[in-house]
Image: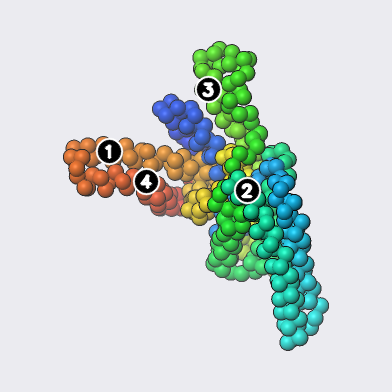
Amino acid sequence: MSGSLRGLMMFALVAGLIGLTGVMQGWNSALVILNMGLVSAIMALGVNLQWGFAGLFNVGVMGFVALGGLAAVLISMPPTTEAWAAGGGRMALAMIAGAATILAAIFVWRRMAPGRRRALAMLAVITVGFIFYRFLFGPARDAIEAVNPAGTGYLGGMSLPILLAWPVGGVLAAGAAWLIGKTALGLRSDYLAIATLGIAEIVIALMRNEDWLSRGVKNVVGLPRPMPFETDLQSDPAFVAQAESLGLTAVEWSTLYVKLGYTALFTVVLVALLVLAQLALASPWGRMMRAIRDNETAAEAMGKNVKARHLQIFILGSAICGLAGAMMTTLDGQLTPGSYQPLRFTFLIWVMVIVGGSGNNFGAVLGGFLIWFLWVQVEPMGLWVLTTLTAPLPDSSAFKEHLLASAPQMRLLTMGVVLLVVLRFYPRGLLPER
């Protein structure tokens, strides 16, 4: 069977599974799975650029996705004028002081000769700068978070269109990737994985604890939407007439209409990224990246700057993950820093890439759809199977209660089984790299 035919059959299978969900569980459920599948496919595409093209083992996907989500808040939410008046100016000065301290330390490191004097000078710069930064930061933070802490308690955003937050989320993640890559890409692959995982946890910890920036665990709700609200559609006589012509109520058609709108937006982004990734893969740059992946020593002997190319593709892949994070936050309509977990936003994305086929962009997209579908549907399917198997047992059976209570764990079991089966029979993924 040719690779193209196999790919068509795999995508047709996933489309059939989503369609079957629509028939059996309702088209709202099917569109929810489809929209998050599109976002997951974009995340998988970003990881595939790093791992499939260049062999970079990035275990900090969660951090870049979270930065994209933060961008949606900073761009689209209205500013909290009271908070800016209370401590916004001092917070801006604190950020400038922190940046100036870092730049001064770098200047001292580069300009002074190695030795004890340089170490003492750097220590003095960092100490003085940190004290001044904390002197500005502490009171500013307290003043901002004291402004209506139950409702706001943060600086807010710039009140710009939410769609603008998507590329900004990519830029924010790319900037973080540049900082990480400049220090960590020289490490061995296992050390790089540890470094990226640790930095991702630091990003999440900051978002959970710095209320002045993202409201922390209080969450930011009510983000602007690129699609109209269902209640507004339901009050439009023309829309109500359109729903009746389709044989649906205004409530049913409004929910489907909004979800279909998100589907169209996400599909445009995914197709554009997929086309660009395919063009990059077939270009001399793509062949160079795969040559570096396969043999860094030989590529370096041919005059290629391996570290610079690794940094380049690390930034590109992280930017795509940040873009997907902004899209996901837009779809949710809220930023919940506590929901960013490595299981969902790192492990699951890697499973998508491995199962779909690393090094193959279409494989990464296929893995994104397939694994997300299984992640969502396995729990109710597992509950149905366990309910059927334990039906002969009495309701008072402790064994029956234990099995039914274990249904949510079917997700993890299924992911492990799928990964093992694919690695056993398709070690290069369902759609392997050509």
Residue picked out by circle 4: 408
**Reading the chain from its start, which is encountered first: label 2 or label 4?**
2
CB under 8 Å between callouts 2 and 1? no
Closer to the camera in the image, 416 or 148:
148
Q: Amino acid at mark 3?
A: Val
Q: Nearer the viewer, mark 4 or mark 3?
A: 3
Residue picked out by circle 3: 251
**What mark, if any, has residue 148 been given in the picture?**
2
Work out how far the residue at label 2 is from the one at label 1, CA to CA, in angstroms. 48 Å
Q: Nearer the viewer, mark 3 or mark 1?
A: 3
**Reading the chain from its start, which is encountered first: label 2 or label 3?**
2
Residue picked out by circle 1: 387
Vertical relation: 280 (above or below) 381? below
Q: Amino acid at mark 4?
A: Pro
Closer to the camera in the image, 234 or 58:
234
**Reading the chain from its start, which is encountered first: label 2 or label 1?**
2
**Reading the chain from its start, which is encountered first: label 1 or label 4?**
1
Q: Amino acid at mark 1?
A: Thr
**SS state under label 1:** helix
Relative placement, left or right, of 191 versus 397 is: right
